[in-house]
Image (cartoon, rainbow, N blue to C red):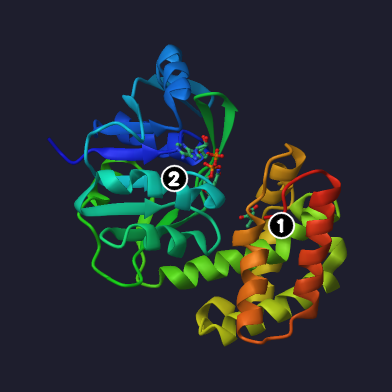
Amino acid sequence: MSTPWHVLGAGSLGTLWATRLARAGKPVRLIVRDPQRLAAYQAAGGLTLVEHGQAQRFNIPGETAESGEPISRLLVACKAYDAEQAVARLAPRLAPGAELILLQNGLGSQDAVAAQVPQARCICASSTEGAFREGDWRVVFAGHGYTWLGDSGHPVAPIWLDDLVDAGIPHEWSTDILTRLWRKLALNCAINPLTVLHDCRNGGLQDHHCEVATLCGELTELLERCGQPAAAQDLAQEVERVIHATAANYSSMYQDVAHQRRTEISYLLGYACKVAARHQLNLPHLNQLQQRLIAHLHSLGLPSD
Ligand code: NAD
Ligand code: KPL
């Protein structure tokens, strides 16, 4: 029997991974928050993935963090702000040599998780796949993309990448995962907060070219100061390209705010501003953007952390 995949978090990405792995015949266990959620999950009869308009249900065994089985491979699929606490609850169940795959966007949560489980190997992921919840336990595969995986402390690829091949999860092992995470963070900082503040789709930022370009200049400075010159290269051009290519889309932060959900601001713009301060780098526009966004979130009654 091959090593089971424990999937923590039955949200969009967790469901997208769990159902594709189960479809490929891999052993998968879903970890939900508490006994009430477990009962609801069991009553629903499994996780449903909607792909190309077709719905398919997978009766993946569910459990809570308190279940006794040791965990050797854990896919952490909750939001960045939940990851540290969620993993801390599972730490006693981790088997020697356990591996964690961290799907969180932004930066900061990965280090916080790794500090909770120093005995485990933490592999970071950066994904351009897109999925959203249509209802409880039901997820729509909305955007085909790619997932880069890597471990900045240990460049050797894990053997379970074969499971991802079998499951049809497009991926690549990356020896510069930090560069990828920083680059994505910079893109998200240049685009997402402005779409919220200007109440527009990504394409709407074409009318705010100067504001975007100024932010890109400061983000480039930050990346260079952090020892991430590759992530800084041609940032402004890529931001413009992404704005154009995703013009009709609403950014993930826009969608969170529109649905009155907590954003991952602390792991995106908040992280960028914190690191800039640590380097004593003065980035006035980035700081002002953070203040404007925090004020806006407060005005909507949403958390700003
Ligand atoms: P989500 O909110 O849809 O799912 C997170 C799930 O984790 C929720 O079901 C929540 O109840 C669960 N959870 C939280 N704490 C838990 C705990 N202690 N025990 C068990 N379950 C717990 O989030 P998502 O959209 O799947 O995003 C996950 C991460 O992936 C985020 O960092 C996001 O930025 C990133 N990401 C998402 C997408 C996407 O298309 N959804 C794409 C790329 C990256
Ligand atoms: O990743 C994104 C998001 O919306 O979170 C893009 C489309 C790149 C915009 O920043």
Q: Which mark is residue 86?
A: 2
Q: Is residue 213 visible?
A: no
To which quarter of the image does residue 45 belong? Answer: top left
Q: Secondary structure at mark 1?
A: helix
Q: Position of residue 283 (x, y in %)?
A: 74, 81
Q: Would the CB of label 1 be found within 8 Å of ligand 2?
A: yes
Does 162 sit left or right of 198 as displayed?
left
Spatial distance from mark 1 to mark 2, Cα to Cα?
26 Å
Identify which residue is drawn at 66% across, 48% down: 252
Task: Count every numbered label the image shows and give the total.
Answer: 2
Q: Which residue is mark 1?
A: 192
The three-letter amino acid code for the residue at tag 1 is Asn
For image coordinates 36% across by 52% down, the residue present is 101
Neighbor class of circle 1 (other Cα within 10 Å; few <14, some 14-19, many 20+) is many
Quadrant containing ligand 2 reads bottom right
Determine whether the residue tagged by mark 2 lies in a helix, strand or loop: helix
The residue under label 2 is which amino acid type? Ala
What is the quadrant of residue 305 in the picture? bottom right
Which comes sooner in the sequence, label 1 or label 2? 2
Q: Residue at x 67, y 73 (%)?
A: 273
Residue 48 place in picture, x, y as percent: 46, 23
* Ligand 1 lies under 8 Å from the Cβ of mark 2: yes
